[in-house]
């Protein structure tokens, strides 16, 4: 596996390929990332991953400084999945000057749900992903980028960005990898104490339950939605969580569903000091 630290090294190395398959990450890789890499591998003629903890997508009180950095371990995991090229720039390489030009996603999509609780998050994500895309795909006629559905809203924002800027990139969403008890795999699960880890599965349980109830409402869903969501929030609150949102939305654009829409149930809640997010398509 070639480790490129600079844009120039990366571009020079990728010149000889026609269709990179790219998995961007912030490192601290777990089975979920490995599943993304495994699915990405056959989609291109070179498998590229990146590790970059992107300051732009963290709020001042969030865990940028303490975000786990496990580079050697990550490299071993990437090699085990046949990763050909790792792009691992330092901050000065990707942000040589303060990043004053930014990719501003549509507020209708980016200022709801996660964006409501993490203002600017999707601007930070879109900006770094655009930079990573120009790094990996510059000069390529086409490419494929693979993202987890665990970050459902992120995946939608990136899809819209690619479409609106007419980037020659196919965006592939991969189903969420889960622990045997159903907890969605996430780097932040590592922050949970043993008790919190045992409790953590209740987020996905609450989402699943909310999804079942939403489906059972049939044509009454628009009228009953707020009540069902409030019940799901109360369920987690009673168990000691601090929920930000548990919402039933239509998959198409994450707006409130109309009768007949395909649904996704999304949630974010804090358990102790750890904020977890998850979603379930129903
Ligand atoms: O999902 C992530 O790990 C990050 O948001 C991403 C896409 C690598 C951008 O920093």
Image (cartoon, helix red, strand yellow):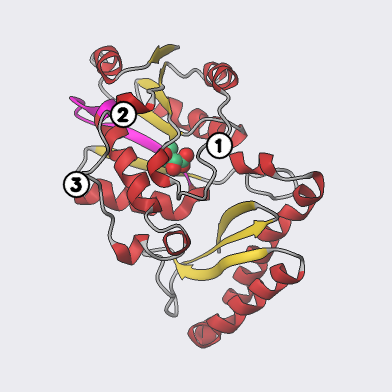
**Mark 1 Cα shell of 10 Å, populated few (<14), some (14-19), many (≥20):** some
Point out the frontmost of discs 3 and 2.
Answer: 2
Q: Secondary structure at mark 1?
A: loop
Image height of 181 relative to 282, above or below:
above
* Earlier sequence position, callout 1 versus callout 3: 1
What numbered label is drawn on residue 67? 1
Marks 2 and 1 close (CB-CB < 8 Å): no
Residue 196 screen position, x and y as percent: 76, 51
Q: Quadrant of residue 156?
A: bottom left
What numbered label is drawn on residue 199? none
Relative horizontal placement of residue 140, taking residue 256 as reference (left or right): left
The question of residue 141 being in magenta is answered with: yes
Q: Secondary structure at mark 3?
A: loop
Quadrant the N terminus occupies: top left
Q: Quadrant of residue 110?
A: bottom left
Q: Which residue is mark 2?
A: 94
User: Residue sitting at 54 percent across and 21 percent down?
Assistant: 71
What numbered label is drawn on residue 165? 3
Quadrant where ligand 1 appears:
top left
Image height of 208 relative to 178, above or below:
below
User: Residue sitting at 40 percent across and 58 percent down?
Assistant: 119
Residue 14 screen position, x and y as percent: 28, 17
Residue 269 screen position, x and y as percent: 61, 60
User: Residue sitting at 61 percent across and 43 percent down?
Assistant: 188
Q: CA distance from mark 2 to mark 1?
A: 18 Å
- Ligand 1 neighbours mark 1 (CB distance < 8 Å): no
- Report the span colored magenta: 135-148
State how many labels appear: 3
Relative horizontal placement of residue 263, taking residue 276 as reference (left or right): left
Q: Secondary structure at mark 2?
A: helix
């Amino acid at each position: 596996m070639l480790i490129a630290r600079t844009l120039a090294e990366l571009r020079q190395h990728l010149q000889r390929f026609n269709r990179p398959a790219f998995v961007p990450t912030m490192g601290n890789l777990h089975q979920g990332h490995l599943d993304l890499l495994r699915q990405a591998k056959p989609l291109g003629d070179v498998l590229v991953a990146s590790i970059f903890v992107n300051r732009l997508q963290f709020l001042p009180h969030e865990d940028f400084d303490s975000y786990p950095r496990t580079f050697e371990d990550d490299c071993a995991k990437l090699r085990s999945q046949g990763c050909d090229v790792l792009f691992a720039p330092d901050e000065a390489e990707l942000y040589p000057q303060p990043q004053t030009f930014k990719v501003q996603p549509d507020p209708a999509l980016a200022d709801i749900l996660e964006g409501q609780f993490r203002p600017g998050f999707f601007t930070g994500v879109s900006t770094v992903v655009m930079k990573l895309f120009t790094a990996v795909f510059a000069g390529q006629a086409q490419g494929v980028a693979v993202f987890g559905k665990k970050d459902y809203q992120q995946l939608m924002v990136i899809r819209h960005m690619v479409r609106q800027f007419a980037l020659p990139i196919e965006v592939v969403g991969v189903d969420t990898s889960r622990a045997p008890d159903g907890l969605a795999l996430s780097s932040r699960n590592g922050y949970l104490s043993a008790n919190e880890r045992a409790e953590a599965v209740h987020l996905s349980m609450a989402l699943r339950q909310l999804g079942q109830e939403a489906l059972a409402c049939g044509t009454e869903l628009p009228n009953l939605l707020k009540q069902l969501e409030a019940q799901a929030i109360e369920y987690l609150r009673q168990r000691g969580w601090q929920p930000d949102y548990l919402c039933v939305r239509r998959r198409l654009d994450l707006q409130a569903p109309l009768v007949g829409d395909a649904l996704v149930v999304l949630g974010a809640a804090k358990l102790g000091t750890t904020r977890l997010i998850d979603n379930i398509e129903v």
